[in-house]
Amino acid sequence: MTAISHMTTAMTERAAAAAARFVVVLGAALLTAVSTALAQTSEAAESSSSDIAVADAVARGRAKYAQTCAPCHARAPGGDMRYAMPGTRALAIKYRGALPAALEDRSDLSYEVLRVFVRNGSWSMPPFRPTELGDEEIRDIAAYLAVSSRGQANANR
Ligand code: HEC
């Protein structure tokens, strides 16, 4: 074999190795996607069989939100930010319309996300200690916000 053909063989092997690695990574990504989809499906099945528990959590969350968060995060009356409470006003400035200013109109606030902000605070938002607001209460608030953002907050159910 000539030096050139040696080099070509080595390069081809490297390319093949790289391709093999790519296939493995792709396979892993696919597996993750499939298992995530399966997990979501089973979650959906569980929640449909516990509608009453969800409704209870939403009701508790709505009351807790009204008492603890709405004083700063209520929707601005008439949508006019001049009359907005400090949380709503601050978020209107932060997102400039890219996200709704009122938490009740957001659909992206999971329990995990809420918990980070509630436990740590954020700028002028004070942190809440677990003795003031338990994790279960944050979970209830997340359940309420998931519903309120779908425009069902005032649906009587
Ligand atoms: C004393 C007023 C006040 C109270 C009470 C308050 N917040 Fe806030 N909150 C704020 C302010 C102001 C901001 C915006 C801070 C900033 O500019 O980043 C904020 C930000 C947030 C954010 C971040 C949103 C984002 O996208 O940046 C979340 C989530 C949040 N608050 C949830 C809550 C929840 C849930 C409660 C009730 C348990 C609550 N807050 C109570 C004032 C308050």
Image: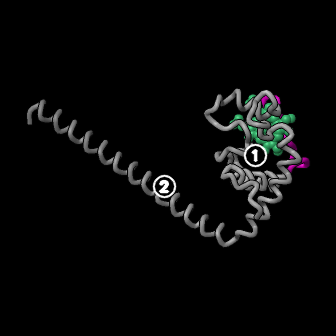
Most common secondary structure along the magenta stretch: loop
Residue at the image point whose x is 73% and y is 46% from the top: 104
Q: Nearer the viewer, mark 1 or mark 2?
A: 1
Report if residue 74 is visible in the image: yes
The answer to whether residue 122 is magenta is yes
Q: Position of residue 83 (x, y in %)?
A: 81, 30
In depth, the one of 57 and 119 nearer the eye is 57
Dot 2: element: helix
Q: Quadrant of residue 155?
A: bottom right
Which span is picked out in magenta?
A: 121-133
Q: Position of residue 138 (x, y in %)?
A: 79, 51
Residue highlighted by disc 1: 115
Tell which residue pokes out farthest to the bottom in this image.
49
Residue at the image point whose x is 42% and y is 54% from the top: 30
Q: Is residue 9 above or below residue 157?
A: above
Q: Position of residue 60 (x, y in %)?
A: 83, 58
**Mark 1 to mark 2: distance in Å?**
26 Å
Q: Is residue 69 above or below residue 8?
A: below
Q: Residues within 10 Å of mark 2 (few under 14, many from 20)?
A: few
Are dots 1 and 2 in contact, CB under 8 Å?
no
Q: Quadrant of ligand 1?
A: top right
Residue at the image point whose x is 31% and y is 42% from the top: 18
Q: Is residue 146 above or below residue 55?
A: above
**Position of residue 97 in the picture relative to residue 83 (left or right):** left
Colour scheme shown: one colour
- Residue 32 badge: 2
